[in-house]
Image (cartoon, rainbow, N blue to C red):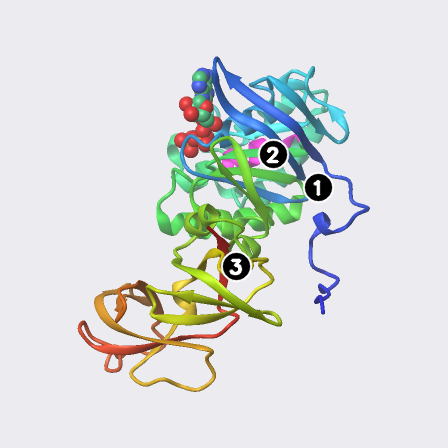
Amino acid sequence: MAQSKPQNVFAPWDDPNEVPLIRFRNVTKRFGTFTAIDSLDLDIYRKEFFALLGPSGCGKTTLMRMLAGFETPSEGKITVDDVDVGPIPPNKRPVNMMFQSYALFPHLTVEDNIAFGLKRSKMSRDEITARVTEMLRLTRLEKFARRKPHQISGGQRQRVALARSLAKAPKLLLLDEPLGALDRKLREETQFELKKIQAEVGITFVVVTHDQEEAMTLSSRIGVMNAGEIVQVGTPHEIYEQPHSRFVANFIGSVNCIEGRVTGREGGHLRIACPDLGAEVTVESGFEAGAGEKVALALRPEKIAMGRTARPGFENTVTGRVEEVAYMGNLTIFQLRTDSGARLRVTQSNTTRTDADVPRIGEVVQLQWTGAAGFVLGA
Ligand code: ATP
């Protein structure tokens, strides 16, 4: 039975009555003979925090630049709020773009940087002051209003750039690697801040990033790109737990892919013979494959339980030997080899401060997982 979602979950893409804010229809972009974006279709909804994620050169920036109006599609149509933006120049689109370099004016104070775009609009002086005050509050920059960009930190400069991009209340804000210039710690803090600000202003954000953790933390949905195509669109949970392809499974997080052949189906379970595991495994899956068909069992490292003895409650058990151990603080990564030669990666959460029970290199252990732990990928 399908599970119904709680009513307060934000999921306009599941609502057939919702009209997308942005639509890409059959969009292709060629640079000479090279096709950077290939017949792409994509819908993005109001108030979404949508991340474009993919390896370097896959076309993320090109897609974003077409939305902003800095590049023109070779074919196809992009609409924002049902208006074809093709003929509209960048400065007339209801879109703002925040660049990775922030592009702040060094000779202007923080508040003047934020007010810059507003002064060129038809707003009155009082309205501008009120708007700048609101933006300073939103980004917690009140104390720095009179400083120049070189007198504040990198994280604060990032917030000024954000405040300036939001000041004109665009329908859509495009962010190109927005946290790329920040160190790891500040980046993690700022991710939550950015998410909070986006929820408060209710503006649709589209972010380009090559950092999967960032995409997972920030976004309502992720569009995974490869070689000019969107290969999967889904919530962070869907992308991680139900990847449609080996590319997505490998690109987001790490995964053990074990080759095998289907031996049969029992209700909701597929049985797969995996020579490298020396076992026939059971996996809960609706994947349509007939007996003899080549598939792969995909298992995330944290879904495998490891112990010196086998425990009840698991449909699948194999024996392995520990080859490598890497202690990461919050978790430990193990590389194992099964008797029949498969290499498996397992991660364990370090729930206690002692390591007395942790299997050592050379130890033989039982590796176990349930039928629901893995998923099936086509050959
Ligand atoms: P990165 O993460 O490295 O920034 P990206 O996914 O943003 O990569 P794009 O900048 O969109 O990638 O580039 C996509 C492809 O199009 C690349 O192969 C790039 O070399 C090519 N490309 C981009 N702009 C041009 C251009 N003006 N002329 C020719 N080729 C281009």
Visible residue check, residue 135: yes
Which numbered mark, 3 or 2, is in the foreground of this view? 3
Mark 2 = which residue?
173
Q: Amino acid at mark 2?
A: Leu
Q: Amino acid at mark 3?
A: Glu
Q: Identify the residue at image location x=58%, y=38%.
A: 206
Task: From the top left corner, tell me how far across and down residue 37 is, in percent.
Answer: 54, 26
Residue farthest toward the front in the current orientation of the protein: 292
Q: Is residue 144 left or right of residue 202?
A: left
**Nearer to us in this view, 232 or 163:** 232
Task: From the top left corner, tell me how far across and down residue 158 is, in percent.
Answer: 46, 37
Q: Which residues are magenta?
A: 160-168
Mark 1 = which residue?
46
> Which comes sooner in the sequence, label 3 or label 2?
2
Alpha carbon separation for disc pair 3 and 2? 29 Å
Task: From the top left corner, tell me how far across and down residue 339 is, in percent.
Answer: 26, 71
